[in-house]
Image: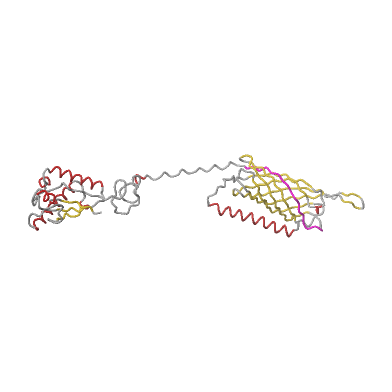
Amino acid sequence: MKRKGLYILIALALGGAGAVHAQDNTSSTEPTTTPSYDGRWYIAPTVGGYYNDSDRNTNSRQFYYGLGVGRFFSPNFSLDLFFDRTKRDRDNININGVPTDNGSWANNNWGVAARYYFRDWTDWRPYLLGGLIGSYHQNNSDKGWDPAAELGVGVSKTITDSSDFRVEGGYRYDWDDKTQSNKSGYGDWFLGVSIVSRFGEPAAAPVAAAPPPPPDCSKMDSDGDGVNDCDDKCPNTPPGTIVGPDGCPQKVVIDLRGVNFKFDRPKKGEKDIGKALAEPSKDSIAVLDQAVDTLQRYPQVHVTVAGFTDSVGKDDYNQSLSERRAKIVYDYLTAHGIDASRLEGPIGHGKNDPIDTNDTDAGRARNRRTELQVQQ
């Protein structure tokens, strides 16, 4: 192989391996399905053979042996520091027709090899190999250091938790230009077998953290409507919306029909609502108690307490009487636990806004009333 072509091939292989490794590191923050890997250090005894460059004038095949030390830095990338040695017998030559043993030379190689693997950790894994080497040669005519490089392919298989088998082949070029003065380098094909043995205790499998318990929805009210998130069937209701027990918008009506007053009652200064109510007063009290219960179930509801009269009497008197009726109901509500901040008034409307005719006793009785007007 021409040296110029080899330079290009080495640059491409090593640059490509480095780029892929960098890409692995860059993408490691993103989710991946690649399984975890064993990052322990390992040793890798190796035996193999060369098919020598014919320019070496040696037997075409020799064995080599060596030892590597390395580790995986990602599921797909490993790096080894290695040493290997081979001894080559030179071919006999004829000098004046007499066969002559031309001796031998040996190579001690120290280098670093990068391997990039494909497929999952436990599969048969093909890989690419690239290495840089310092080669020390010894022979009858010279000894010294020269650079060398190798490219190759291989396949690896995990045998046990702590060992792998791998076999690889490739091409190694040695820039030895001293052993033979008319040669400037040699390219040899090689095939090697290694048993990779990891040492030390394997890393403990990562323990997945238990997911945090879900928040207790019974203690949460995301939309602030007074209904916890467990029971709220209408989440995200706008602030101030009146909702029912299920959290859904609800129009609240507090009907005080049935709470009617005796004619010209309550008198000024009268505090006992029971004496001012039309008979049977217990029916009107029951309606008022229902109103208290409704207001307690809907604490966000505000009401206006308004009083009314029939048309009998002077307007000024009826205005004052309607205000007394509103005030006595207002006081009943606050006395039964309804906060005054939720009550507007009391206000009186006199004889205005009748709900029935003022031409009959029954109609006038229904007009003598108090209303709770819900502020929707």
Q: Check the picture and name the quadrant holding the N terminus.
A: bottom right
The magenta-colored residue range is 182-198
- Residue 34 coordinates in the image, percent (x, y): 57, 47
Q: Nearer the viewer, residue 174 or 166?
A: 166
Q: Nearer the viewer, residue 228 or 143?
A: 228
User: Residue drawn 69% across and 45% down?
Assistant: 167
- Residue 295 coordinates in the image, percent (x, y): 23, 48
Q: Nearer the viewer, residue 270 or 175?
A: 270
User: Residue drawn 45% across and 44% down?
Assistant: 211
Above or below: residue 279 compared with residue 237? above
- Residue 206 coordinates in the image, percent (x, y): 52, 43
From this viewpoint, which residue is outermost toward the right?
96
Q: Check the picture and name the quadrant holding the C terminus.
A: bottom left
> Residue 185 colored magenta?
yes
User: Residue drawn 53% across and 50% down?
Assistant: 31
Residue 206 falls left or right of residue 178: left
- Residue 175 coordinates in the image, percent (x, y): 75, 56
Residue 157 falls left or right of residue 267: right
Residue 28 falls left or right of residue 136: left
